[in-house]
Image (cartoon, rainbow, N blue to C red):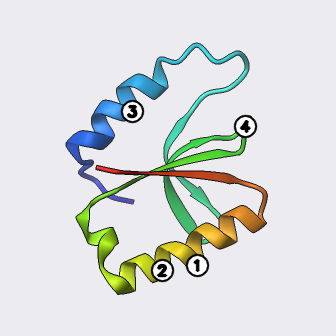
Amino acid sequence: MRANTTPHERILWRALKNLPLEGSHFRRQAPIGPYVVDFFCPAKRLIIELDGGHHNEDDTAARDLVRQGWLEREGYSVIRFRN
């Protein structure tokens, strides 16, 4: 897990943690299997990922596809946004 979050992650976290979702909430930098996801709502099995510029690099993009495939096979929905 990263000790320092990006400004984009801090902004999104402030919004997500205050959402009035009945019986659900978001966690930040949550471990799921072998991965740590940016934001996770367990009740909805929803993952939100914020991708910085390094996610456009071929090797990182390939790892992201493998990671997202694993998460989706485990029953999670993954939404990705660019910073």
Q: Is residue 15 left or right of residue 76?
A: left
In the displayed structure, would residue 17 be above or below residue 47?
A: above
SS for tag 1? helix
Viewer-nearest of labels 3 and 1? 1
Q: Is residue 49 left or right of residue 35?
A: left
Q: Which of disc 1 and disc 4 is earlier in sequence?
A: 4
Which residue is denoted by mark 3 in the rendering?
Answer: 13
Q: Gap between marks 1 and 2, in whole Å?
A: 5 Å
In the displayed structure, would residue 53 be above or below residue 22?
A: below
Which residue is denoted by mark 1 in the rendering?
Answer: 66
SS for tag 4? loop
Q: Position of residue 7 (x, y in %)?
A: 21, 41
Q: Which of disc 2 and disc 4 is earlier in sequence?
A: 4
Which residue is denoted by mark 2 in the rendering?
Answer: 63
Q: Gap between marks 3 and 2, in whole Å?
A: 24 Å
Q: Position of residue 16 (x, y in %)?
A: 47, 27
Mark 4 Cα shell of 10 Å, populated few (<14), some (14-19), many (≥20): few
Q: Going 28% across and 59% down the picture, which residue do you hit?
A: 52
Q: Going 47% across and 82% down the picture, which residue do you hit?
A: 62
Q: Gap between marks 4 and 2, in whole Å?
A: 24 Å
Q: Amino acid at mark 1?
A: Val
Q: Going 52% across and 18% down the picture, which residue do you hit?
A: 19
Viewer-nearest of labels 3 and 2? 2
In the foreground, 28 or 68: 68
Q: Position of residue 14 (x, y in %)?
A: 36, 25
Q: Amino acid at mark 4?
A: Lys
Mark 2 Cα shell of 10 Å, populated few (<14), some (14-19), many (≥20): few
In the foreground, 16 or 31: 16
Q: Going 37% across and 33% down the picture, which residue do you hit?
A: 12
Q: Amino acid at mark 3?
A: Trp
Which residue is denoted by mark 4 in the rendering?
Answer: 44
